Each structure stands twice: as C-alpha cells, then as structure tokens.
Image (cartoon, helix red, strand yellow):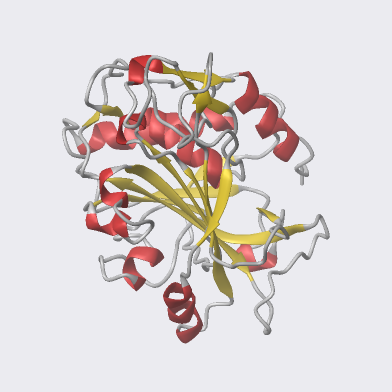
Amino acid sequence: MRQRFFVIAAVAVGFLLCLAAQPAVSADVPATPTVSYADFSAIDAGLAANGVKARLYRVDYTTRPDSGQYGGTIFARNVGNKQLGSHWVPNDPRRFGSRDIYYAIDGTELAANGAPSEDGVIDAIDQAMGTWNGVACSTIPIVKADDYGLDLGYVQYLLGYGGLPGWVADISHAGWLPATFFDEVAPGGSEYIIGVTYTFVWVTATGQCTDVDRNAKCDVAFREIYYNNYFLWSLDGPAWNDLEIDVETIVLHETGHGLSQGHFGKMFVDASDKLPPYSVSHLHFSPRAVMNAVYWDTQRSLLGSDVAGHCSIWGAWPLK
C-alpha cells in the first residue's frame, strides 16, 4: 500500500455542560454548550515552516464527568460566530485523489495504561472503525493504511512529544501519550481529557480555508486522534462505576469526530448532586449517544442519533 502523507489545519473545542434533570442544580452549570477559542499559532507556525498548506482548525475532546469538566470544541481561529463546518472532499487530489477514507494506527505508542496487550488495543481500534464503516446509509469505504512502524503524529512532533512531520492516512490514531500532552489542549487537561481529535484544513496563500467543492465547509486535510495515558484503560467493557475507561468506546467516539461529527446531546445532573465533580450515578443524557461529550460507560454500538448524524454527513458521498 503506497505511503500517503497529509497536512494539518484545524482545531476546535467547545464545552458541553450540564443542566438539572429536575429542578435547577447550580448556576455554575450552563444550560447550553459553549464554543471556545485558543491560540494554537505555534502549531500553525510549525506547519508553515515545513511548507504544509494546512492549518489547525479545531480540537474536539471528551472527558470524564467526575472531573467536573465537560468535553467540548476549541477553535484555533477566533472569527466570532462565523465558524464553518469542516469535511473531507471526495477524490481530492491533495488527498491522493481517492474517495476512500484511510486510517492508520501508530506503531509505537499503543501501551495503553492497564490494557493487557497492544494487539488487543489494535483490535479495539479496528473494531470501532468497522462499526462506523458498517452504517448502512454510508457509501464510504473506510480503509486501513500501513503505519510503516512509524511514530505517527504531526501535533506531537510540533509540541516535542515524538511523532513525525507528516502523515500516512486521513485519520491517524496517534497513540497513548503522557498526561502533560493534554495540558497543551486546555489548562489542567491532563487530569480530565480522555481523548482528543485535531482537525487540520487546507488553506490558501492568505491563510483562508479552502472550499473547492463549494459546500460551505472547510476542506479537511487530515485528522489526528490522541488518548490520555494518565487514565486506566480496559479492553473488557468496564461498567459505569469502574475506574477503567473502555478503549473501543473512546475510539468509536473520537473516530466520529474524525468522520466530521461533532458533539451533541445534553447532560443533566440530578437535583440531589449540587456541585461538581458530579457522581456518575447522577448523570443523565438526552439523547444518549456515542457522540455525547462525556464518557459515561462502555458503549460500543452506535445509537440512533449517531447513525442519523453520520447519514446526514455521508449519505451523499459519491460512489466513484
């Protein structure tokens, strides 16, 4: 399989936070999601220095609810409420001219804390990719690319955590990184961010994102997914009250971002649980979905809202 290198351009993060399921819980818990902005210019400068015509656009992350922090989206560029969506362009010559979506798994950073084997981690990632690929309405082939045994990850390369200045697939599962890497996403992120997806978009010479297919969305160049090795991970489908985090569930969620889905649904807290950090037993989701911004328990199957979102994005993907 030939090597495919892509470029970076986008990051976004927005908070999905809670509201009481019955009476109001606390004024500290917003009723609606918010979108934030952060300065990731150092990443963009690194891309520009390497001649890459892509820039970071957004960062999406998911969290543990008992941390009192909630997953969200951070935009790398502050343009007010004029943020555009972002999506892959079929047969994009900048993306080796294919309608397939390729994914690769880092060959060096798969020692998830607590998981019994790296082979098991690979199987969990492949299973999650297969779940998205199996949605009936979708016409995209999601194809596994060779990792060439490389330490994948352009973001981690630019931030000094290994990696390499390039990419071999559209979506890179760039591995399990030390907790401090996630402090680069948000203050204290090492203690509450479980997984994060970086979106990079193609840009013009003046730094504006391109939209060659004129769908009012920025053209995605590549995406990278990272997992936080601060937490304990499991391959056994842990229950909601276990400390471990299920590998396949988080991969399924982050891959949803890789396939252009955002967070959705609201999280509610029982009136009996007044202040963060909230007990997981008091949380409720409406609707319950893989793409909720907060990890609750093992969820390896897509639910109705996940499928509907995927079909709305990918249902018209061309057959050739």
Task: Specify the quadrant of the image occupied by residue 98.
Answer: bottom right
- Residue extending farthest right: 214
Q: Which residue is at a point 69% across and 74% down the rendered structure image?
A: 208
Number of marks present in the image shown: 0
Q: Position of residue 219 (x, y in %)?
A: 68, 61
Q: Nearer the viewer, residue 17 or 123?
A: 17
Q: Quadrant of residue 270?
A: top left
Residue 135 is at least partly visible in this image: no
Residue 118 is left or right of residue 221, and the answer is: left
* Res 137 quadrant in image: top right
In the figure, 102 relative to 219: above or below? above
Q: Is residue 234 above or below residue 113?
A: above
Query: Residue 24's spot in the image, x, y percent?
Result: 52, 22
Q: Residue at x 26, y 31 (%)?
A: 120
In the rendered view, would you say 192 is above or below 6?
above
Percent coordinates x, y for residue 75 in the rendering: 56, 59
Residue 93 or 226: which is nearer the viewer?
226
Residue at (83% x, 60% y) in the render: 214
Q: Nearer the viewer, residue 13 or 226?
A: 13
